[in-house]
Every structure is written in C-alpha cells, then in structure tokens.
Image: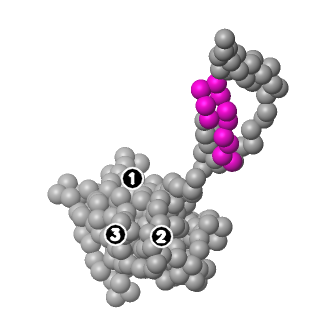
Amino acid sequence: MSIDTTDNVRTLVTVAQQAAAPVALEVGKYHVVRTADGFRTVDLTTPEHTGVPERKQGTTTVRDAVSFGAYFDKHADSNTEVYADAERLTVTAVLDAHTADGPRWSGHRLTLSLCKTKAWEQWIANDGRLLGQEQFAEFLEDHLPELLEPSAAEMLEIAQSIQGATKAEFQSSTRLSSGQRQFAFVETVTAKAGQKGQLTIPETFVIGLVPFEGSEGYRLTARFRYRLGREGGLTLGYKLERPGDVIRKAFADVVTAIGEQIEQPIMNGTPA
C-alpha cells in the first residue's frame, strides 16, 4: 500500500515558513519572496518606499535676478533652456529641457516673475490725472524720496505753497521765460480778504523710480499739468514721459544681468 506524502510535505513547508524569522528587505532594491502560493516580486525602488522622487519637477518662482541665478546654478545643466517674455515680464528656465539626442520631462522649471514696486504703481496710478490742490500737495510730500530735480526740499516748498493757496481764487496763468508756470490768485480767507499772490511751479520735474523689486533705479521726466476752473479753482497733475519705455528698458537690463551669470543663450519667447 503506497502513501501519498505530497500533502504532508506541503504542510511541513508551510509550518517551516511560518516558523522562520522574518528577514528585513532592503529599500531601493527588488526582492523575490517565497510565499505559500509561490514566489512574489517586491519592488522597493518606488518613491513610495524610498521617499525619494523619481525626478525633479515643479516650478519655482523668484522675484529678482540674483535669486534666479542662485537657483539656476544649483539645478541647471548644459541642455537647460532659458526664455525671456517681455510682454509678461518673465524669464523662464526649463531646467530639464529636451536634449539634441532625445526627450526629457521638461517639468522642472524656474521662473523670474518681476514685481512692480509700490512707488512705481503709485506714480503710474496718478499719471495724467488732475487732483485738487491739497490732494496733489500731499502726494508730492508722500513721495519726496523719489523727487530729484528740483530737489526734494524745493518740491516740498512748492507743495506747501500749493497747500497754502487752497483758499484762493486763481485768476490767470503765465508761462515765464524760465519755463516755469506762474499762477496769479486772490486770497479768499477772511483774514486776508482781497490779498493777491502768486504761485510758481516748474514746467517739468524729474523723479527717480525703481520699477521692479530688486532692480536698478531709472530717471523719468514729468510735465506739470493744470486746469483753472470757472470759479477760480485750480487742479494740478503731471504726465510722465514714456513710462512704458522705462519698463522695457528695466526688463531688458534684468535679462542682461541674468545673461551675464549663465552660459546658456536667452531666447525671446515662452517655453511650450
């Protein structure tokens, strides 16, 4: 009489496997593990087990050329591509761009997104607007650090003169040979009823503005504008000369500064 020992052997193998001490598997490698049902492959090379991403990816945004250069030096290689977009005021580096021999992920990027300064935005906001005397004088006083010619002290004096004449009736305007504009007025304050006076302001003045955070400063010329109201009121303002050209020049200078830090050419456009 023959005895089938197959079931007994399987039982012994199962008991032996269960009794064996567990073996630690090494992360970062493939392992073949024998189970009661056979063999099973265990992949411990995935990011889920290693804690390390398969590749670099994502977009980092910086605000100045120095920060752009620091991140670029750390992650770029000879195949990195750099694009400058003058419309969006951005510089984008595709750090893992395609090579001449084959594709890459193109998913690791660095973008310089320039942020306009508060002073620039405030000057632009009032560009071409006519303001009341007191409002215009306060604007000049709030922006004395940006006033270059005439000096901040002279412009402060002008602002104070404008504020001092807020209760006056302006009667005429004359352009002097020096290019300045002179306004004749009559005081309407009770204590000075009927007292005549003059207010003189320059035809133009020069300001110094930093268009973008972390960029250089630029000079802009502003032309005084005014309007005499029917009832003797005076409104004042200014018109900046070609501020758009200054923005384009400032952006071009930022691109040049980046180009001096890197070996890769900077292309005009936007990456796919």
View extreme (bottom): residue? 177
View extreme (front): residue? 1
Q: Counting other residues with Cα less than 10 Å from the Cα at mark 1, is it few (<14), some (14-19), or many (20 or more)?
A: some
The numbered mark, 1 or 2, whose residue comes first in the sequence reads 2
Residue 61 appears in the picture as rendered = no
View extreme (top): residue? 1
Number of marks present in the image shown: 3
Task: Mark 3 vs mark 1: give the one in front.
Answer: 3
Q: Nearer the viewer, residue 8 or 80?
A: 8
Q: Is residue 208 left or right of residue 24?
A: left
Q: Is residue 47 above or below residue 97?
A: above
Q: Nearer the viewer, residue 203 or 45?
A: 45
Residue drawn at point x = 57 percent, y = 83 percent: 263
Residue drawn at point x = 45 percent, y = 80 percent: 100
Q: Which amino acid, by three-letter code, is at mark 3?
A: Glu
Q: Secondary structure at mark 2?
A: loop
| Percent coordinates x, y for residue 261 in the rendering | 61, 80
Q: Which residue is mark 3?
A: 87
Q: Which residue is mark 1?
A: 135
